[in-house]
């Protein structure tokens, strides 16, 4: 059994080797799975208050290109350094989970202009107590929309910049501007 497995592994490696040796001068495509690291600016707003922080996280998805049109699905896990001190009370944004889709158009061969929309769930915590202070607390569901540009650096690597807006329960929203760097498989 193990000899059969080793033979199959050697055969599949021999067949796949030419794909790994492809020249990076080939035409770029936006089809395939991708993973990326993201980071940027995060502004959380709620109850007529706002505060800024930094966001960081990972994004993964799959895109399918047909002509110059690209359709994709993606998921993301991120966190934020946003923290608002209000006397004896501290409100903090933490993890944010996102699942959604995007549609885009290829411009100039290696640039993708896209829009996105989907579901987001963020965690907000409140520490301390004070009279008359009403802040969001717990896991809040919401919707996210955004737009961005992705630039292929070669056949696999890419960079992107994106703006997005999320609207959550309890009157909380956030604006984010981010950059990302990733690989397509």
Image (spheres, rainbow, N blue to C red):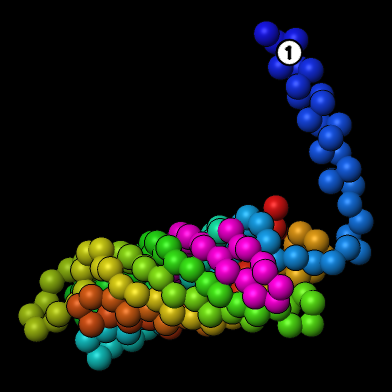
Residue 69 is one of the magenta-drawn residues: yes
Identify which residue is drawn at 82% across, 26% down.
Answer: 11
> Which is more toward the observer, 54 or 113?
113
> Which is more toward the observer, 37 or 141?
141
Question: Which of the 4 quarters of the picture holds residue 180?
Answer: bottom right
- Coordinates of residue 165 in the picture (x, y in percent): 42, 82
Report the residue marked by disc 1: 4
- Coordinates of residue 21 in the picture (x, y in percent): 90, 47
Looking at the image, residue 20 sits to the left or right of residue 93; the answer is right
> Which is more toward the observer, 182 or 70?
70
Residue 2 is one of the magenta-drawn residues: no
Viewport quadrant of the N terminus = top right
Residue 11 can be seen, yes or no:
yes
Question: Which of the 4 quarters of the picture holds residue 117?
Answer: bottom left
Q: How many marks?
A: 1
* Vertical placement of residue 157 versus 3, above or below: below
Looking at the image, residue 157 sits to the left or right of residue 82; the answer is right
Identify which residue is drawn at 21% across, 68% down.
Answer: 137
Looking at the image, residue 3 sits to the left or right of residue 146; the answer is right
Question: Which of the 4 quarters of the picture holds residue 125?
Answer: bottom left
Q: Element under label 1?
A: helix
- Coordinates of residue 58 in the picture (x, y in percent): 54, 59
Identify which residue is drawn at 73% across, 13% down.
Answer: 4
Which SS does the magenta portion mostly show? strand
Crowding near pointer 1: few (<14 within 10 Å), some, many (20+)? few
* Vertical placement of residue 98 versus 48, above or below: above
* Vertical placement of residue 89 versus 21, above or below: below
Magenta stretch bounds: 62-81
Extreme residue in the left direction:
131
Residue 85 can be seen, yes or no:
no
């Amino acid at each position: 059994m193990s000899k059969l497995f080793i033979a199959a592994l050697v055969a599949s490696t021999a067949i796949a080797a030419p794909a790994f040796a492809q020249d990076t001068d080939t035409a770029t495509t936006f089809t395939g799975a991708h993973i990326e690291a993201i980071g940027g600016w995060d502004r959380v707003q709620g109850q007529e208050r706002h505060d800024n922080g930094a966001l960081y996280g990972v994004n993964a998805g799959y895109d399918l290109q047909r002509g110059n049109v690209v359709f994709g699905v993606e998921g993301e896990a991120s966190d934020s350094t946003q923290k608002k001190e209000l006397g004896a009370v501290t409100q903090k944004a933490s993890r944010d989970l996102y699942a959604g889709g995007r549609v885009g158009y290829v411009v100039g061969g290696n640039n993708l202009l896209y829009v996105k929309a989907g579901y987001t769930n963020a965690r907000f915590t409140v520490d301390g107590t004070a009279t008359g202070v009403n802040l969001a607390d717990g896991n809040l569901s919401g919707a996210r929309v955004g737009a961005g540009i992705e630039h292929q650096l070669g056949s696999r690597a890419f960079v992107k910049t994106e703006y997005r807006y999320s609207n959550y329960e309890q009157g909380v929203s956030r604006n984010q501007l981010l950059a990302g760097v990733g690989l397509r498989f």
